[in-house]
Each structure stands twice: as C-alpha cells, then as structure tokens.
Amino acid sequence: MATRNVISDSEDFLQLSEMRIMRLGCRESGKSSAGNTILGREEFALGTTVQCLKRQGKVAGRQVTVVDNPGWWRNHTVEETPELVKDHIVNSVYLCPPGPHTLLLVIRVDPSFTEKNRKAVEEHLELLSKTVWSHTIVLFTCWDCLGDTRAAH
C-alpha cells in the first residue's frame, strides 16, 4: 500500500476555531474512551470499533471533530493486518476534511509491550505519511492497571 501525505499543514494551534482529531491505536487500547473524554460525553460505544466514526461537539468554545477507526491487533505487522482495516485507517482522514490537525495515538500501558508491538505501531501510522510523527500526540491509557509495578519502571 502506498504511503500518502494526507495530514493537513500546520496552522497556528492557538488561533484555531475548530480542531480535527483522528485517533489511532491497536484494538482495546482505549480509543473510544479517549474520544468520549475529549468530547465530554458518551459518543463512542465502548468495545470493538468495526467502522470509521465521526463525532463532533463544542469543547472550550471550539468545534471539535473526533474520528475513530478500527484498530489493528497489537501483535500484527502491517502485512498481517487485513486490507479492510488498513483502508479504514487511510480513509478515515477524509471524515475530517481537509485532514486532521493531529493524530492521537492511543497506547495501552502494558509491561508486555515489545519491540514488535512498537514496530507495528510505527508501520500502521506510516500508512498515512512518513512525516506522521510531526502531527502525533501519544496518549498512554490504563496507567492504573500497572498497580505497584509503576515504581519499578
């Protein structure tokens, strides 16, 4: 699958009257919960997302668009990910024209996160653009699931 440059150019973040956010991450990472938190209400059903969804609302006086898409399996490389999931990732940018201001990469905190998992994240994001990281914010979820192991890290 060819890499596309579909992320909108940088704008003066503080001057924006609207914000377009696309969430990405593997399955069960907390993408839907993050979207609900951003919008301040339950807009995304918790569980497995099977299609791209767009929800909007006013947050701090700004129109905010949040786009969700199906996640990939944590241990799957891009080659192992079904074409339909890859298509959803790439095409979800068109739900917030002319493109998202930022990508919110949602990663579940997990001591078993491996180098293979990291590479899978990188590969899936690069379906959008080789420069995707300059538009990406990483959100770590389920930090409380670590319990007392946090002190060791």
Image (tube, grey):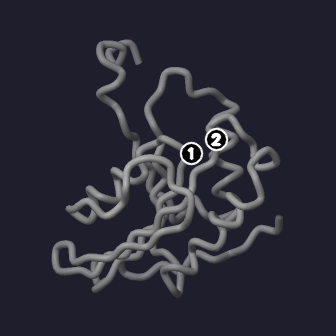
Residue 120 marker: none
- Type of residue at label 1? Cys
Q: Residue at x 51, y 86 (%)?
A: 97
Q: Quadrant of the C terminus?
A: top left
**How would you rate the neighbour count of disc 2 (Cα within 10 Å): few for under 14, some for 14-19, many for 20 or more?**
some
Secondary-structure class at tag 1: loop
Q: Are marks 1 and 2 in contact (CB under 8 Å)?
A: yes
Q: CA distance from mark 1 to mark 2?
A: 6 Å
The earlier-in-sequence mark between 1 and 2 is 1
- The correct choice, above or below, for 87 with respect to 113 in the image is below
Where residue 19 appears, as percent x and y from the top left, is 35, 77
Q: Quadrant of the N terminus?
A: bottom right
137 relative to 84 in the view: left or right: left
Q: Residue at x 40, y 41 (%)?
A: 140
- The correct choice, above or below, for 102 with respect to 58 in the image is above
User: Circle 2 is placed at which residue position?
Assistant: 73
70 relative to 16 in the view: left or right: right
Where residue 107 appears, as percent x and y from the top left, is 48, 42
Location of residue 39 by image quarter: bottom left
Where residue 59 appears, as percent x and y from the top left, is 21, 72
Q: Residue at x 54, y 67 (%)?
A: 52
Name of the residue lying farthest toward the left: 60
Residue 26 marker: 1
